[in-house]
Amino acid sequence: MTRSDPDPSISDPERPPACTDAPPGRGARPAHPRELLRLRSVRTAIDSIRRTDSRTLQEQVEIAEIPAPPFAEDARAAHVESGFRDAGLSRVERDGAGNVLGLLPGEDSLPPVLLSAHLDTVFPAGTDSSIRLIGNCFTGPSIMDDSRGLAALLAVARSVVLGGARPHHPLLFVGTVGEEGPGDLRGVKHLFGENGAARACHGFISLDGAGLGRIVVRGIGSIRLRFRLTGPGGHSWSDWGEPNPLHLLARGVDALTKLPLPATPRTTLTVARWGGGRSINSIPDEGWIEVDLRSEDGALLADLERRVRRHMQEATQPEGPGSLRLSVEEIGRRPAGATEAHAPLVVAALAASRVIGTEPLLSSSSTDANIPMSLGIPALTMGAGGEGGRAHTMDEWYRNTRGPEGVVRALLTCLAVAGVSPEP
Ligand SMILES: [Zn+2]
């Protein structure tokens, strides 16, 4: 998860409870999490989550200590894969992108409900991934984002198999690759792509990081562009007058910072990095900038991209003799999207939160859920219990305050959306 904007203005849209024994049709009717508590299988699963909390925590530390740099998630994927097998999931496999999949079967004719967490971290190969326990606080890279989500994912898989609940919609457990910046959501893009396992999907729940306090139902879209300006360069004295890529890029940056941006839906433009030049006494033959554009609204984001490209084109034209070449490279593209607050998935997540005694806010962020949201598939992202902070730093920390409650909430949410067969 990369950023959040809690929005306290969204009200609770809870609907009356539906029954748990609805006959499966195109989509089985969701159950209410409170009704699920009447089922022995669900109570057994919840008991098991609470009893095995220390195992879940230990596994979280083990996962965090397995390096998973961008594009090199394999070792961590292998751990999750064997965890899925040990839990008793079926059809455990890796897909073409490297995502790890495991299934709890339901009605064959129904599309699955996905529960996922991401395998990758932001930390490059060679980073010291050891986790330290200071007091009751675990500290070290990726201990929260998203080792907590992965440990919770495995705990839900173990407990639901142990309890023996029979969901109408199959539950597909997934460890995804490529959630963080450079990965550009390549794992979920594959999952929901033409040959992906989730092309038909009843709902998508991503467990990302710690906490119980918010549920992400709006996916912030982003477009990341690198503008590169090249020319002949030259000696800073004898060739003075040749067009200078850095001077013209500075003019472009100035134009970008003057673009009006709407406050609602929130839309941002950040010139995040720039560089170029060869020496202090040379006219550069190259300069570049990287620009990060974000919006909660896909159409606004597309319009902003058009304006940014046009302004950069215009601002970087040399006024005098000589010419420069502008090229634009796309570094990343995450579509925006949203799940309606009254969608059964969101209703289920809010109700499950109340069952564990918490009242989360609905908020925005950029996560794996962006992709299904952009395709109109109900999707959300939530924390997996406990508390933590300093994500993406070497001081990332996690404390297991109400940790098991996050796992219970994930279990109840996916079973509520999947619907569960009645028990004798
Ligand atoms: Zn994350």
Image: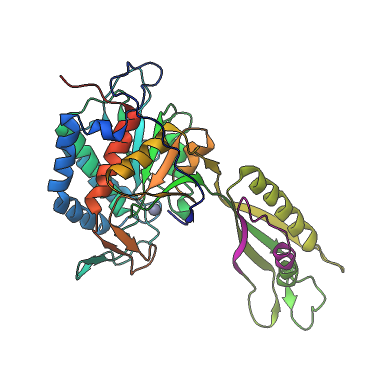
Residue extent of the magenta highlight: 252-274
Height in image: 255 above or below 234? above
Q: Position of residue 334 (x, y in %)?
A: 54, 46
Q: Position of residue 235 (x, y in %)?
A: 74, 79
Image quarter where the C terminus lies is: top left
- At horizontal 16% and vertical 33% (from top left) the residue drawn is 163
Q: How many circles with numbers are drawn on the protein?
A: 0
- At horizontal 28% and vertical 42% (from top left) the residue drawn is 355
Height in image: 3 above or below 24? below
Q: Horizontal placement of 153 versus 216: left or right?
A: left
Q: Can residue 96 be seen in the rendering of this structure? A: no
- At horizontal 34% and vertical 68% (from top left) the residue drawn is 394
Q: Is residue 257 magenta?
A: yes
Height in image: 371 above or below 212? above
Name the outermost residue toward the front: 16
Q: Horizontal placement of 159 versus 174: left or right?
A: left
Q: Position of residue 173 (x, y in %)?
A: 30, 36
- At horizontal 73% and vertical 52% (from top left) the residue drawn is 307
Height in image: 397 above or below 110? below
| In-front residue for pair 57/20 | 20
| In-front residue for pair 103/65 | 103
Q: Position of residue 277 (x, y in %)?
A: 65, 73
Q: Is residue 311 magenta?
A: no
